[in-house]
Image (cartoon, rainbow, N blue to C red):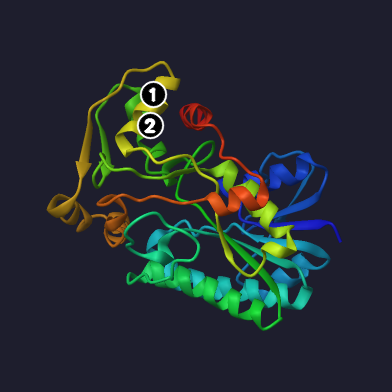
């Protein structure tokens, strides 16, 4: 039973599928449209993953089901995620596949000091509580012996394929043209960035390590830098000069958010950019022997993309 099912073809899903295919593993990528990823040796399925019967059929004989879904409309998470998360749990319980969940740091909420896996999921905003509940349900089912589950959590993504979903990569096109970049919150505080390829590597490693199941792991990530420095480093790898960087924060952010549903949703997470946001990934580095992609390569890949 060496078939793997990847649900979602965003940056994480694509890199998981590519990693598996490169080593010769049988892998299928499922999306609503069934659109091809262009990856050689990868099967593509049209699937509504919120339908547990359809997902169970697709997951039949799969060793691992990877939840790499990322509902594109950020404002509809509260309606899209609950049935989708429930469907995953039902499908992996029926089929016996390992459930590998791509998580994020939202469940922790605002914390003081570096984030480690032993912190409680104590978010107070609705997105953080939603993501915390997804993992709590999966962990409870794991502890009850109904399924095997593991979650990996990374910080803000950089690297190939991230595009507008990354707080740095979304301003790179403007900065490459030499224009001022507007970034969310303070740009002078240490902030951890995670290469999306390292998310994929950690997710696969955690899924295939039975001793790693039943808990969360932080994706190996480079030492934190400021948002402004991250953008400057990306530009440097492209042979371009630094550009002026401005901050959207406080009342200005709130005012713009009144006209932008996306910024209104992100405003609830403003704490991530108003204090140091540092991820401790030492446990996963030691467990899986994965080092973060060198920072220069992270920046180079972000510029190329």
Query: Which disc, if any, is residue 235?
Result: 1
Q: Residue at x 47, y 56 (%)?
A: 72
Q: Which residue is drawn at 38% across and 39% down?
A: 170
Query: Which disc, if any, is residue 172?
Result: 2
Asked if the residue at tag 2 contacts the one at tag 1, i.e. Cβ–Cβ closer than 8 Å, the answer is: yes
Residue 34 visible to an observer of this rendering = no
Which quarter shows the N terminus? bottom right
Q: Which is nearer the eye, 9 or 18?
A: 18
Task: Rate crowding at label 2 as few (under 14), some (14 to 19) or many (20 or more) other CA atoms within 10 Å.
Answer: many
- 169 to the left or right of 92: left
Q: Earlier in the sequence, mark 1 or mark 2?
A: 2
Does residue 210 lie above or below 203 as drawn? below
Query: Which disc, if any, is residue 180?
Result: none
Cα distance in 3D space between marks 1 and 2 = 8 Å
Q: Which is nearer the eye, 281 or 125?
A: 281
Instruction: Find residue 68 and report its horizontal and vertical position in percent.
Output: 59, 57
Task: Rate crowding at label 1 as few (under 14), some (14 to 19) or many (20 or more) other CA atoms within 10 Å.
Answer: many
Disc 2 secondary structure class? helix
Q: Which residue is drawn at 49% across and 69% down?
A: 80
């Amino acid at each position: 039973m060496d078939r793997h099912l990847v649900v979602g073809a965003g940056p994480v899903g694509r890199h998981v599928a590519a990693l598996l295919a490169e080593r010769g593993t049988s892998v299928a990528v499922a999306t609503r449209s069934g659109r091809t990823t262009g990856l050689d040796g990868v099967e593509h399925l049209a699937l509504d993953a919120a339908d547990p019967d359809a997902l169970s059929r697709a997951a039949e004989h799969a060793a691992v089901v990877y939840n790499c879904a990322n509902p594109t409309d950020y404002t509809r998470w509260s309606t899209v995620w609950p049935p989708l998360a429930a469907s995953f749990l039902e499908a992996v319980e029926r089929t016996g596949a390992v459930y590998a969940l791509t998580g994020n740091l939202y469940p922790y909420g605002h914390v003081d000091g570096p984030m480690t896996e032993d912190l409680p999921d104590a978010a107070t905003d609705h997105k953080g509580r939603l993501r915390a509940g997804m993992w709590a349900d999966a962990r409870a089912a794991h502890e009850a012996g109904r399924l095997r589950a593991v979650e990996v959590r990374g910080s803000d993504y950089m690297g190939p394929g991230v595009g507008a979903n990354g707080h740095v990569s979304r301003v790179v096109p403007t900065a490459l043209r030499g224009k001022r970049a507007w970034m969310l919150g303070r740009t002078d505080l240490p902030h951890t960035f995670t290469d999306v390829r390292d998310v994929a590597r950690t997710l696969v490693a955690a899924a295939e390590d039975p001793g790693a199941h039943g808990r969360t792991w932080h994706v190996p990530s480079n030492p934190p830098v400021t948002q402004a420095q991250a953008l400057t480093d990306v530009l440097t790898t492209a042979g371009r000069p630094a550009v002026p960087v401005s901050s959207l924060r406080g009342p200005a952010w709130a005012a713009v958010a009144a006209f932008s549903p996306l910024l209104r949703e992100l405003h609830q997470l403003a704490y991530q950019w108003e204090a140091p946001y540092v991820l401790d990934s030492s446990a996963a580095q030691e467990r899986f022997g994965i080092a973060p992609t060198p920072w220069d390569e992270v920046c180079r890949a972000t510029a190329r993309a």
